[in-house]
Amino acid sequence: MKINWGTGIVLAFIAFISFILFFVVRMNMDDRANHDLVTEEYYQAELGYQKEIDAENNANADDKKLKVSKTLEGLLIEFPENINVSEVKGTVSLYRPSNKHLDFDFPISLSNSHLLIPDKRLLDGRWDIKISWEDQKENYLHKESITY
């Protein structure tokens, strides 16, 4: 039986589509593939997003910017000098995009205008830092990505 051009093109398309579908089905059914959302309560977090935008604007407008830097001891977070450290409340969240089991949160407890996260808690790689704090009943938010 002789195959003409039209039949060859159709067979090539069918083979290509089958090849692609095979890999799509294989990746969706594979237990090793991790298909987690960024956050567990994605839709609930989306509703509070406007509050985050307002808190970021507060931090930028009121000169309440934080400085995050790497030191030999760990990650140093410097709060502005013009705040009362005894009234600051909030949390520091460190999110690891590659492994959700490395994520951790801890409350802000300041004795001076610096906060140090020990080096032993941070593995090498990318970290997303989210620092939300409250000073004089005003909410502030700082977000940053670093490579440690």
Image (cartoon, rainbow, N blue to C red):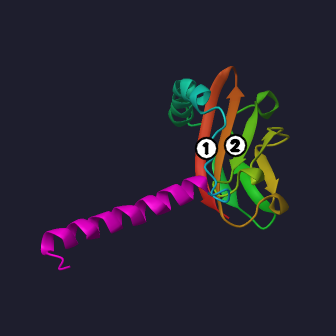
Q: Where residue 38 is drawn, which disc sits there?
A: 1
Q: Where residue 17 is drawn, which disc sits there?
A: none
Which quadrant is the C terminus positioned in?
A: bottom right
Q: Is residue 120 left or right of residue 2?
A: right
State whether residue 82 appears in this view.
no
Determine crowd level at label 2: few under 14, some 14-19, many 20+ residues with C-alpha closer than 10 A.
some
What span is colored magenta in the figure? 1-29
Is the residue 23 above or below the residue 106 in the image?
below
Q: Which one is nearer the viewer's eye here, 69 or 83?
A: 69
Q: Is residue 56 left or right of residue 18?
A: right
Please provide percent x and percent y for residue 141: 61, 35
Q: Secondary structure at mark 1?
A: loop
Give the residue pinned by disc 2. 79
Q: Which one is nearer the viewer's eye here, 65 or 83?
A: 65
Identify which amino acid the numbered label 2 is placed on. Phe
Q: Are marks 1 and 2 in contact (CB under 8 Å)?
A: no
Q: Is residue 31 left or right of residue 60?
A: right
State whether residue 86 appears in this view.
yes
Which residue occupies 67% across, 56% down? 31
Which residue occupies 70% across, 27% down? 135
**Quarter-wise, where is residue 112 in the image?**
top right
Q: Is residue 94 magenta?
A: no
Question: Magenta region's main secondary structure?
Answer: helix
Q: Secondary structure at mark 2?
A: loop
Q: Is residue 24 magenta?
A: yes
Give the label, 1 or 2, closer to the camera. Answer: 1
Which quadrant is the N terminus positioned in?
A: bottom left
Mark pair 1, 2: CA separation: 28 Å
Please provide percent x and percent y for residue 68: 66, 53
Identify which amino acid the numbered label 1 is placed on. Val
Seen as rendered, the residue at the extreme left is 5
Q: Which one is nearer the viewer's eye here, 67 or 14?
A: 14
